[in-house]
Amino acid sequence: MWNELPKDPMILLSVVNTKLRNHYDSLDAFCQDMGIEKQELTDRLGQIDYEYMEERNQFV
């Protein structure tokens, strides 16, 4: 369901972190619900030097 997420990496970061903060208790739950691969998302945000911090449930 990548077509439902922004293509711009900075906007994607904002959307994902907002959804994680307000609606999902883990990145796994978010990815499963959105039907996307966790590794693909982390790689995409890693290109702009952000990584997922599980203990904070957000990309930093």
Image: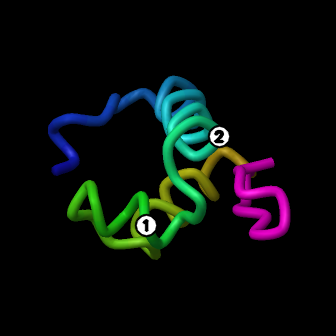
The type of residue carrying mark 1 is: Ala
Distance from disc 1 to disc 2, alpha carbons, whole Å, reads 12 Å
Q: Give the SS element for disc 2.
A: helix
Q: In screen coordinates, is 55 left or right of 20?
A: right
Q: Nearer the viewer, residue 21 or 58?
A: 21
The type of residue carrying mark 2 is: Arg
Which residue has dot 2 on it?
A: 21
Across the whole image, how many numbered discs are drawn on residues? 2
| Residue depicted at x 42% and y 58% | 30
Which percent across, then down, holds residue 60?
A: 80, 48
Which residue has dot 1 on it?
A: 29
* Label located before the other in sequence (1 or 2): 2
Q: Judge the density around disc 1: few (<14), some (14-19), many (≥20) Cα neighbours within 10 Å.
A: some
Q: Give the SS element for disc 1.
A: helix
Which percent across, then down, holds residue 9?
A: 50, 35
Which percent across, then down, holds residue 57?
A: 72, 57
Tell me which segment is drawn in magenta: 50-60
Which percent across, then down, holds residue 15?
A: 49, 30
Q: Judge the density around disc 2: few (<14), some (14-19), many (≥20) Cα neighbours within 10 Å.
A: some
Q: In screen coordinates, is 49 left or right of 26?
A: right
